Structures are given as C-alpha cells and as structure tokens.
Amino acid sequence: MLHERVPEVFAGVDQILHAGDVGGDEILQALREIAPVTSVPGNNDDGMGEEFARVTLDGLRIAITHILPRPHDLDARVTRELARRPADLVVFGHSHLPHDERVAGVWYFNPASSGPRRFDYPTSVGIIEKSNGEWIGRHIPLDDRSVKALETRMNQLSHSPRSS
C-alpha cells in the first residue's frame, strides 16, 4: 500500500524514480497516477537488485539501481556501468538508509524507504530539484518519528562496515 502522504509530497513532480523494493504492481500504478515513473526491481521484487535504469532530466544524467552497496565501495557491476555510461546522479535503494553524498564527482542519493517501517530507520522519500541553477536533494520525512531518524541515519553508508 502506498504511504498516505506520498501523493501530497509528490504533487507536481515531473518524474518519480524508484530504486526498488517497490512492494507490488499496485504501488507502481498508484505512483503512475501522480507522475511518470522510472524504476528498477529490488531484491524483494523478485529481481536480483542489480538492474539499472537511466533517465536524463533537464540535463542531469541519472542512473537508478537497487544495490550499490556503498558510495565509497561500489559493487564491481556499478563501477563497470558508470564507466560505460557516466551519470551525474545515482539513485539507489536496498539499505533503506538515507544518503546524500558526492564522491569523485558523482552524486549518490538514497531516499530511504516509504514502505513499512524497518528498525529505527526513517520513513521518507526524496525530492531532487534545481534551485538557483544547482541540483539539490531533500529527504522528506513521512511521519514525526522520521524527522530525528533522518538526522541520525543520514549518510551512514559513508562509514566503513567496521565503524558502523
């Protein structure tokens, strides 16, 4: 079931990007009623979580994948794909942890998850927009508890697995 706040938060967006673990075709259909959708299947969607989708929005080259796993320690298939077809922004999922970081000239963004709450992770979506000629990303908490969870969990994927 689509989170009740998603239609309100996404009202007026040009495109919806979904980085997997969709939760069913009914979710994609509900999102398509808001705006065009570009998505990849996640490992919980009967996919491997390794597929890529591409879209260019207002000159921003975007790659979407489910499993990355970390911007500083990319999976070999991600490294190969970005060498083959560079991207300015990589939207990813899998960890359900919010992320917004630029590494070696590439912007990595994970909106976290708008699905059922997991652990103490935030329930949120992301908005990518151009402001004063610069691309920015915002995480939008979908409930009060997620305001603090976004702050606490932001960019944890930047740390080595041993220090997390």
Image (cartoon, grey):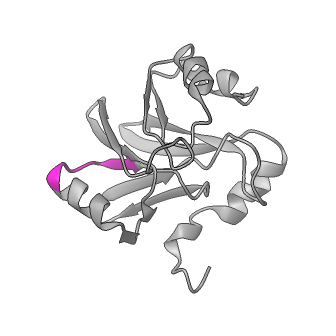
Position of 154 compared to 3: left or right? left
Residue sitting at the far left = 84
Residue sitting at the far front = 46
> What range of the chain is rendered magenta?
84-90
The residue under the point 61% across, 45% down is 139
The residue under the point 57% across, 37% down is 22
Residue sitting at the far right = 144
| x and y, in percent, of residue 82 in the image | 24, 55
The answer to whether residue 48 is seen in the rendering is yes
The residue under the point 39% across, 60% down is 102
Based on the picture, tell me whether residue 88 belongs to the magenta stretch: yes
| x and y, in percent, of residue 20 in the image | 51, 42
Position of 135 compared to 32: left or right? left
Number of numbered markers: 0
Position above or below: 1 against 108: above
Position of 24 compared to 148: left or right? left
Q: Quadrant of the C terminus?
A: bottom right
